[in-house]
Image: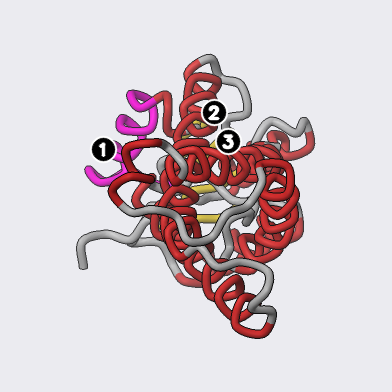
Amino acid sequence: VFSFILIPVDYIMLVIAGLVVYFLRYESFIAQLRPPIFEIGLGEYIQIVLLVSIIWMPIFAFAGMYAIRRPRRLVDDFTRVILGCSTGLVAIVFFIFFRHELFGSRFIVLFGWLGAIVFVFLGRIIVRSVQRSMYKKSIGVLRVVVFGEDANTYHLVQSLKEDKAAGYVIIRHFKNLDDASRGSLINIVKNRQADMVIYAAPNQRRENLANLLRFCHENHLDFSYAADVL
């Protein structure tokens, strides 16, 4: 849902960035400092911004900005925003090169690129903040089953319990992967009470790990392996 919400948010932020850059360009202080050589009416400019923003959407998608996954760190989001906006800038430059009559303001093009990065990233900060606030209320969280009994496992479980904004809630914690825990896991899956399994038991046999991985695949559960230090 939040990956889908990012699409209209990014579009709106691109349009806002374009308008902000336009008014900055023709603001009296900047106009006096560097008189504009290229004049364009606001109505025509808005049409261009709306079109360019639509063209940038599939570019953002190819840059992986709408991948359906758990929230990334903001620094990862920022990197992808730079990648998407830079690719969009290259597309605009090529278009201007082949259609020179379309546009001639280097200020608007370059600062539009910078403004797009700033505003798109700002939109993502807002969306992520809303998402994390919902996680704190246990809305949209991943329900997790954990396997393991060493110190690292307990540290992992405690961290997930304390960090409500991470988007995880511990449903069950099994010390070992045995017949009893398998039976309990089957009942949990039948009642649709879990979304993910975290395997953090380094001393288990590989056959057990392979069977658990196969079980998660067959029942559409996310699977993560938390390795020990070695």
Image mark for residue 60 = none
Is 111 in front, or is 201?
Answer: 111
Q: Residues within 10 Å of mark 3 (few under 14, many from 20)?
A: many
Going from the N terminus, do you reach mark 1 or mark 3 first? 3
Q: Which residues are magenta?
A: 147-163
Q: Choose mark 1 or mark 3, whichever is in front.
A: 3
Residue 199 magenta-highlighted = no
Image height of 37 relative to 155, above or below = below
Tell me the kind of residue under disc 1: His
Looking at the rendering, in which quadrant would you find the N terminus? top right
The tally of labels here is: 3
Tell me the kind of residue under disc 3: Leu
Residue 105 rendering spot, x and y as whole percentages: 50, 62
Looking at the rendering, in which quadrant would you find the C terminus? bottom left
Kindly tell me whether residue 108 is visible in this rendering: yes
Going from the N terminus, do you reach mark 3 or mark 2 first? 2
Residue 156 magenta-highlighted = yes
Going from the N terminus, do you reach mark 1 or mark 2 first? 2
Kindly tell me whether residue 195 is visible in this rendering: no
Q: Residue furthest right?
A: 190
Which residue is under mark 2?
A: 131
Which residue is under mark 1?
A: 155
Tell me the kind of residue under disc 2: Gln
Q: Residue furthest top?
A: 137
Q: Choose mark 3 or mark 2, whichever is in front.
A: 2
Residue 193 rendering spot, x and y as whole percentages: 69, 30
Identify the residue at image location x=43%, y=33%: 166
Residue 141 rendering spot, x and y as whole percentages: 57, 30
Q: CA distance from mark 3 to mark 2?
A: 13 Å
Which residue is under mark 3?
A: 142
Identify the residue at image location x=37%, y=56%: 226
